[in-house]
Image (tube, rainbow, N blue to C red):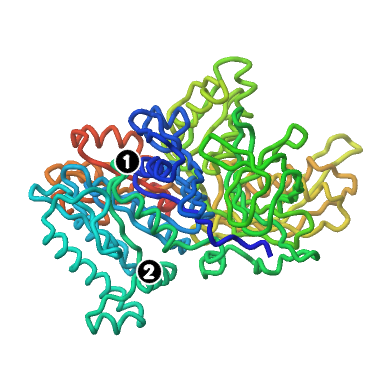
Amino acid sequence: MGLPDDSIRNIGIIAHIDAGKTTLTERILHETGELKVCGAVEEGNTVSDYLLQERERGISIVSAAVTCPWKGRQYTILDTPGHIDFTAEVERSLRVMDGAVAVFCALRGVQAQSEMVWRRARGYALPGLAFISKLDREGADFHATLSQMRRLFAPVRPVPLMLPLPDEEGRTACLLDLLEGKPVGFPPVAPPDEVELQLWDGRRALLETLAEMDDSLLGDYLEGRTPPLERMRAALRRATLENRIVPVLCGSAKAGWGVPQLLDAVGDFLPSPRERLQSPGGRKCFSISLEKLASPQGKAFAVMSVVKTVRAPWPGDYVAVRLYSGCLHPGDLLVNVNRGISWRVGALWRLCADQVQEIPEANAGEVVGLAASPQEPIPPFRAGDTLTQEGAPPLRLAKMRFPEPVLSLVLEALGPEERLRLPQALDALAEEDPTLRWKHGPNDGQCTLSGLGELHLQVARDRLLTEHRVRTRAGTPLVAYRITVGNTADLQREFRRVLSPSLTVQARVHIRFEPLPPDSGAQLEFPAELPGLPPETLSAVRQAVNEFVQGENPSGYPLTNTRITVLEVSTSQPDTSEPVFLTATRLGLVDALDQAGMVVLEPVMRLEVSAPAEQIGAVLQDLQARRARVAQVETLTDGGSHVVALVPVANMLSYATTLRSITAGRALFTAEPAALEKRPGQDS
């Protein structure tokens, strides 16, 4: 049938910025034999951070796919960014992965972004493992981090499969593998009796947890027996795949402690692509069962989801896809179901960050690159598009959802040639990153770029220069406001103009505006056809409505949370041209918006700040001045404080600089888009 091989594992590594995701990816490549020497983030020579901006800033900006073998299995690993400005990379990685490995810093515990990406993984019902890293560092506290996980991740239960055993000075003396019942990683310096006692206590606690969840182990626990290792592994696997527990491993990615055990756990406890497809979470992605995709020859049609499109001089343009069924070969004709576009595959690539290896075929369950050929350039595919083999029955995978931009920046190219290249360069960036949007204006020769934050927009400008050789000057970041309507409006508008004594043009439209609940977006409804009018008339009406929704309205802001219904379009002049209907529709939309009552919405961020307790007063005072609504203030186990607040984006500009100043650089924060709220100062 061409269903996925059970020896494949596709996982995403998720965490807060600086928690150690890239270092762990580097160590995995070393352990699996793909690297002879590990690179370092601070030295800018890691495999998965390959963009110039990543190496200069020491952060991950794009998700990098690497493929490696481990004990007869093929692992595809996506190293995802930890900064909220690059959340699109995290979202699409989670959408196509079968499991997740969440990395936590043993010094800082469960940081804000770690919690956010974990919630997103839970939203996709992804089974996961946890790896508490940096246990080789002074001040590392495994048990404090585990306690935070238990509190924040309920009802999913973190279950330790490994424990660190400290020496007399509190440093990690050795790691204890509770399943194998032995020390691992490096020679223990703790007394043998202490090692045996800690192993016995840890294994007993593990068995107690498993007995609560699996009746097959209850008898062993009550009678004080240790069940066979394979039965314990089977019980752990069932509970993990059912999202009732998350196995917790530990060590140090930089030193290599615990990484082989983590790789074993990925194979033992996370699902294969086949198991993922057959799970409730996996079935949400499909409108029909993949088993129904058999061709007349008895083989499954190839069905895949677009992860992203990459336009690059090296290794060349390609589309990264996750293949869900069937088998794919160079030269196969694919259909983009979402856009009705056909495209022939030039070559197939195994991806390793920015390096590629050409392969003869790709099978179900794999994440690969589809390379373009000179004769078949890649059409404008978008993340989440469904590609199927020619002849496959209609099938559309679930769409990917991304947050809307919250900041805008007006860009102007510096030279005449660069001015011509700027729109094409912005197109390439927006095609790769769906949270980047751009449009022409506000003045000739200028373009407005919108994104998720100041860092997001700055990185985009840097990439315009380094990848597309376009130098730009930029204005001050502007908040990306939205508008909606306060009431329902039903309006008929007639446009009439006398062009000459013998020629009068006339068109009439009937439009309704209705407010919708938050997060509904703009919903547009048009007649299926316009009796007595050519098809071009309806195209003109659609154009006017789409332009209005995208910001060509009196406010200049995009419209959201509103349904616009075009009820009727008519004319008494049979030869009326499309521009007349375009104008009539535009005038009708403006009048309907005025009648319905325009409401300006401002984006609000969910801000989380961790700071030393003695500085939390200054943090709260600053937030109050920014119109923040503080939702939670909590004392952390390390003596610090944690604040959660909702802050308008307009008051978040340059927050990183201010926070660094008032806390002497000792505070950390993360922010994510939370809601659109009515802008103050408007009539109720």
Q: Position of residue 205 (x, y in %)?
A: 22, 71
Q: Is residue 66 left or right of residue 175?
A: right
- Circle 1 residues within 10 Å: few <14, some 14–19, many ≥20: some
Q: Is residue 553 visible?
A: no
Q: Nearer the viewer, residue 382 or 93?
A: 93
Q: Nearer the viewer, mark 2 or mark 1?
A: 2
User: Which quadrant is home to the C terminus?
Assistant: bottom left
Q: Is residue 99 left or right of residue 564?
A: left
Single out the residue that lies furthest toward the right: 502
Look at mark 2 in the image and give the residue it sits on: 233
Q: Nearer the viewer, residue 532 or 656?
A: 656
Looking at the picture, does residue 537 appear above or below residue 562?
Answer: above
Q: Is residue 647 visible?
A: yes
Q: Position of residue 146 (x, y in %)?
A: 24, 59
Looking at the picture, does residue 232 appear above or below residue 575?
Answer: below
Q: Nearer the viewer, residue 303 or 605?
A: 303
Looking at the rendered structure, the kind of residue marked 1 is Asp
Q: Is residue 551 left or right of residue 213?
A: right
Q: Could you say whether the residue bearing mark 1 is in a helix, strand or loop?
A: loop
Look at mark 1 in the image and give the residue it sits on: 18
Q: Position of residue 264 (x, y in %)?
A: 39, 57
Seen at 24% across and 51% down, the residue is 109
User: Which quadrant is home to the N terminus?
Assistant: bottom right
Looking at the rendered structure, the kind of residue marked 2 is Arg
Seen at 65% across and 69% down, the residue is 289
Q: Which mark is residue 428?
A: none
